[in-house]
Image: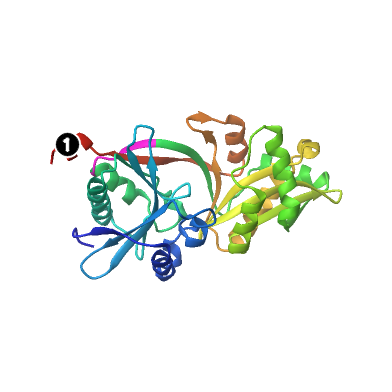
């Protein structure tokens, strides 16, 4: 890639054209222009890494003010992890060039900090260990952002798990596959109301996302006696990775454990579609483990992977003297 990269500020339209030219395996759902802009895109800044000839990487970011008046660059913009997008897999030395240019841009703009959460390697070719290694080389500090539970497909379940599935079947739990948002959302609202918290997405936002990504965002269900007993919302993060964003069990059916059957059957469906990894999302809140959630996900053959957030601090006092 070479080390003569410079960053210029771009636009949503330019980013969209670059993203559409990028091979699918190098893209994430969270990096797509339609995902980034489903909420108000105005706070987003689009960065374009360029060499002498062309654009080699692009990313969306937030410029976030702090109470003391400083500003920070947050990559990605409007998503849990991702960016920058490149049209080929980047090596460690390529990431060193990309991050060095980002540091130079941050210093020129007078930003106090860069904060970046790369994707875990299983999501595809973008990011991974190369990105993290390059960040550490350049003086970024790693902070734990969460513990994710991920299963490799296909999964061979043990006899105890198979017995639980047979119990679900004896209780007449049936996997029904795709359901409509109107059927899913009341179950989501019911679960979050019990815990007195609000879900990440409103019903209107889920409707927008489903309309924009009809194949990549799905609502699935399992029923008992003709009514829904459990539901889930899944995001196809990349061509090889599905993520369970929401899991909802109807309170009156919790004793029947319908989520076991729903997830086990959906993992089979995901593998049949070419998915290699099934991501159950985080099993922690900040640095506090949710032991019951962690234990439930491990039944499906998942292992824990630490998602890291990398921070680089600018010495503004030194910059002001130069």
Q: Can residue 306 be seen at all in this image of the molecule? A: yes
The reply, left or right, for residue 156 in relation to residue 13 is right
Q: Residue at horizontal 48%, vertical 32%?
A: 286
Tell me: residue 191, above or below residue 5. above
How far across and down, in percent of the image, does residue 6 sit? Answer: 23, 58
Looking at the image, residue 126 lies above or below residue 279: below
Name the residue tied to disc 1: 318
- For image coordinates 64% across by 35% down, the residue present is 197
Number of numbered discs present?
Answer: 1
Coordinates of residue 77 in the picture (x, y in percent): 43, 50
Q: Residues within 10 Å of mark 1 (few under 14, many from 20)?
A: few
- The quadrant in which the C terminus is found is top left
Observer-nearest of 12 and 167 = 12
- Is residue 140 found inside the magenta-colored segment of the image? yes
What colour scheme was applied to this rendering of the protein? rainbow
Residue range (magenta) = 138-143
Whether residue 312 is in magenta: the answer is: no
| Snapshot quadrant of residue 283 | top right
Is residue 213 visible in the rendered image? The answer is no
Is residue 190 left or right of 65 when viewed as pictured?
right
In x, y percent, where is residue 151? Answer: 54, 48
Give the image location of residue 281, x and y in percent.
Answer: 54, 44
**Above or below for 306 versus 271:** above
Is disc 1 placed on a helix, strand or loop?
A: helix
Q: Residue furthest left?
A: 322
């Amino acid at each position: 890639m070479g080390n003569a990269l410079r960053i210029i500020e771009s636009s949503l339209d330019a980013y969209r054209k670059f993203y559409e030219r990028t091979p699918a395996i190098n893209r994430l759902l969270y990096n797509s222009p339609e995902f980034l802009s489903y909420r108000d895109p105005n706070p987003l800044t689009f960065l374009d890494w360029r060499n002498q000839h062309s654009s080699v990487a692009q990313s969306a970011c937030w410029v976030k003010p702090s109470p003391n008046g400083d500003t920070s660059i947050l990559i990605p913009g409007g998503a849990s992890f991702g960016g920058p997008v490149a049209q080929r897999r980047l090596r460690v030395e390529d990431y060193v060039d990309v991050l060095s240019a980002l540091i130079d841009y941050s210093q020129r703009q007078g930003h106090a900090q860069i904060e970046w959460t790369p994707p875990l390697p299983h999501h595809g070719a973008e990011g991974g260990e190369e990105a993290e290694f390059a960040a550490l080389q350049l003086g970024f500090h790693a902070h734990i952002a969460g513990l994710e539970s991920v299963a490799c497909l296909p999964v061979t379940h043990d006899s105890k798990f198979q017995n639980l599935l047979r119990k679900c079947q004896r209780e007449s739990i049936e996997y029904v596959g795709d359901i409509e948002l109107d059927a899913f959302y009341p179950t989501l609202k019911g679960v979050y109301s019990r815990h007195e918290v609000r879900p990440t997405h409103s019903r209107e936002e889920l409707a927008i996302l489903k309309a924009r990504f009809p194949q990549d965002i799905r609502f699935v269900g399992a029923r008992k006696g003709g009514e829904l007993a459990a539901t889930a919302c899944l995001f196809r993060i990349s061509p090889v990775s599905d993520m369970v964003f929401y899991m909802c069990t109807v309170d009156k059916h919790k004793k029947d454990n319908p989520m076991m059957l729903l997830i086990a059957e959906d993992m089979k469906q995901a593998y049949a579609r070419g998915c290699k990894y099934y991501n159950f999302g985080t099993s922690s809140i900040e640095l506090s483990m949710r032991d019951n959630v962690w234990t439930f996900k491990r039944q499906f053959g998942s292992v824990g992977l630490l998602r890291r957030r990398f921070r680089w601090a600018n010495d503004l006092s030194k910059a002001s003297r130069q």
